[in-house]
Image: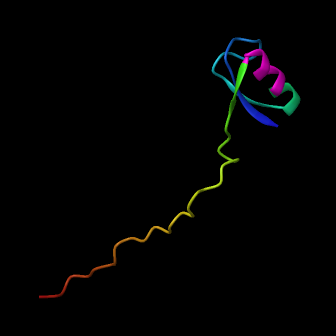
């Protein structure tokens, strides 16, 4: 399955709409120029692992 973005209106899909289609259909649409391949956010692997967010240390005020 590949994610494609349609470049022209093809009922029931409109230009600019992104859909997941089977590989064979995606290759056919891309070859015709009716769609272009779009990377899915799920296909990408992060270059660097995300660092855990560390907040500021908890501070208390001294009593007077």
Which residue corresponds to the image point at 54% horizontal and 63% vertical from the top-left?
50
Which residue corresponds to the image point at 70% horizontal and 11% vertical from the top-left?
9
Whether residue 6 is in magenta: the answer is no
In the picture, measured across the screen, residue 62 lies left or right of residue 32, that is: left
Which residue corresponds to the image point at 85% horizontal and 33% vertical from the top-left?
23
Highlighted range, magenta: 27-34
Does any portion of residue 22 appear in the rendered image?
Answer: no
Quarter holding the N terminus?
Answer: top right
Q: Nearer the viewer, residue 58 or 4?
A: 4
Q: Residue 22, relative to residue 31: is it above or below?
A: below
Which residue corresponds to the image point at 73% horizontal and 16% vertical from the top-left?
33
Picture quadrant where residue 11 is located: top right
Whether residue 29 is in magenta: the answer is yes
Which residue ends up furthest to the right in the rendered image? 24
* Magenta stretch: helix, strand or loop mostly: helix
In the picture, measured across the screen, residue 10 lies left or right of residue 47, that is: right
Does any portion of residue 42 appear in the rendered image?
Answer: yes
Quarter holding the C terminus?
Answer: bottom left
Q: Nearer the viewer, residue 7 or 32?
A: 32
Q: Residue 36, relative to residue 51: is it above or below?
A: above
**Image x and y of residue 43, in percent:** 70, 47
**Image x and y of residue 20, in percent:** 77, 32
Picture quadrant where residue 55 is located: bottom left
Q: Residue 11, relative to residue 37: is it above or below?
A: above
**Image x and y of residue 30, in percent:** 76, 22
**Image x and y of residue 34, in percent:** 73, 16
In the picture, measured across the screen, residue 32 lies left or right of residue 40, that is: right
Q: How many marks?
A: 0
Which residue ends up furthest to the left in the rendered image? 64
């Amino acid at each position: 399955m590949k994610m494609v973005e349609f470049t022209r209106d093809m009922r029931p899909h409109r230009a600019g709409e992104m859909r997941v289609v089977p590989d064979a259909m995606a290759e056919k649409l891309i070859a015709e120029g009716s769609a272009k391949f779009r990377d899915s956010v799920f296909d990408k692997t992060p270059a660097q692992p995300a660092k855990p967010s560390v907040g500021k240390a908890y501070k208390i005020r001294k009593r007077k």
